[in-house]
Image (cartoon, grey):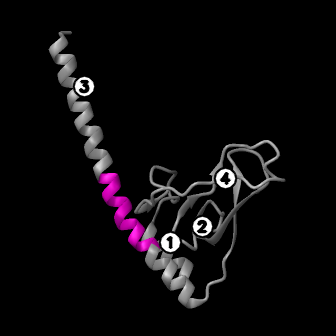
Amino acid sequence: MSDESRQERAARANEHRAAHERRRAQEAAKAQILVDRFVADAVYAGLPVEELTARPWHGRGRYRTGVVGWYLRSDGSVGVSRDGGFYLLTVPPVRFGRWRTVRVDPVPPPLQVGEGARDGESVALELLLRMRLGGA
């Protein structure tokens, strides 16, 4: 394989990666608007908040996170904080995690929660937020 064709393939791969990142950023911006609207509606409706807990990838138990907000899924795997942060609440196992607060960082929200998961596990963010507010 010539050096030119390798460079061309690398350039095309970089273009695809950049386009993918742009699409994800645009999607996250649209999804963040939905999350912010949900937070405002939840506060207005008086939806009670609670400390969100995370669970390890494998094993049992829940870890305290120090994040206060609302769960979006009944299994507690996704949550939104009062300040509009979107959290995936499944974390690597943490030694002594049951007795300490575990750090979780907000992630850019997707428009489709659980995309790429098994059948029936993927749901539109807008529908998930509406269901949590009780309007579905």
Q: Which labelled disc corresponds to residue 73?
A: 2
Residues at discs 2 and 1 in contact (Cβ within 8 Å): yes
Q: Amino acid at mark 2?
A: Arg
Q: Residue at x 25, y 38 (%)?
A: 16
What span is in magenta?
A: 23-35
Crowding near the residue tagged with mark 4, few <14, some 14–19, many ≥20 C-alpha atoms within 10 Å: few
Where, by quadrant of the figure, is residue 74 drawn? bottom right
Q: Residue at x 51, y 60 (%)?
A: 120
Calculate the distance from the C-alpha at mark 2 to the C-alpha at mark 4: 20 Å
Residues at discs 3 and 1 in contact (Cβ within 8 Å): no
- For label 1, the residue is 128
Q: Earlier in the sequence, mark 3 or mark 1?
A: 3
Calculate the distance from the C-alpha at mark 2 to the C-alpha at mark 3: 40 Å
Calculate the distance from the C-alpha at mark 3 to the C-alpha at mark 1: 39 Å
Q: Amino acid at mark 4?
A: Arg
Q: Which labelled disc corresponds to residue 63?
A: none
- For label 4, the residue is 103
Crowding near the residue tagged with mark 3, few <14, some 14–19, many ≥20 C-alpha atoms within 10 Å: few
Calculate the distance from the C-alpha at mark 4 to the C-alpha at mark 1: 24 Å
Q: Which labelled disc corresponds to residue 10?
A: 3
